[in-house]
Amino acid sequence: MNEALPDLIARFRVKHGLFRKETVEAQLFDLDQYGCVLKTDKVFNPGDTLQLDLVMDMPFENIRAKGISGLVTERRKHCSNFFYSIDFMDSSPGKKASICEQLKRIRDVLRKKQSLRSRRSSGSSPSIRQPV
């Protein structure tokens, strides 16, 4: 969990007072079918729920999983930010199937991006020839 997942963010709204809401974008550091780990400077407590939209930035059309309910299960402080473990909560059956499909698509594309990135980084070290 050293590095943020490439091109993937979580968007959610935080309520400030009675009438004001703020849209927050947070980097994701882990994602599976059960939940995710995100990093933000906003303060939440274990037991809080969030409505997340996961957005993967793509060249032509972004991949989105909208309206995911998440339960904050763990909080770890890191400098001036917090890492939050979020467990996805069950939705209605119709909505759940759609969300699961979008999450699977995001995970598949993410796996491919990470594979390409690791191949690039392992193959990018130039060979240095020593003079004979």
Image: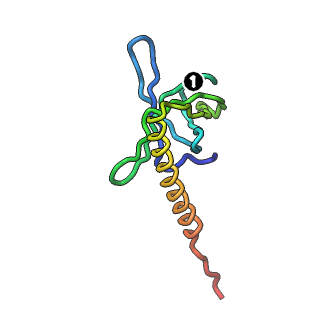
Q: Residue visible at 48% across and 34% down?
A: 93
Position in image of residue 21 (x %, y %): 41, 20
| Label 1: few (<14), some (14–19) or many (≥20) C-alpha neighbours in 10 Å | few
Position in image of residue 74 (x %, y %): 66, 30
Quarter location, residue 70: top right
Quarter location, residue 33: top right
Position in image of residue 110 (x %, y %): 51, 53
Of the residues shown, which amino acid type is indicated by label 1? Val
Q: Residue furthest front?
A: 93
For residue 25, say whether it is visible: no
Q: Residue visible at 42% across and 11% down?
A: 18
Q: Residue visible at 38% across and 47% down?
A: 62
Residue labelled with disc 1: 43
Q: Which part of the image, by quadrant, shows the C terminus?
A: bottom right
Number of numbered markers: 1
33 or 40: nearer the viewer: 33
Taking 44 as reference, is 98 above or below it? below
Q: Residue visible at 48% across and 28% down?
A: 51
For residue 50, say whether it is visible: yes
Taking 131 as reference, is 116 above or below it? above
Q: Residue furthest bottom?
A: 132
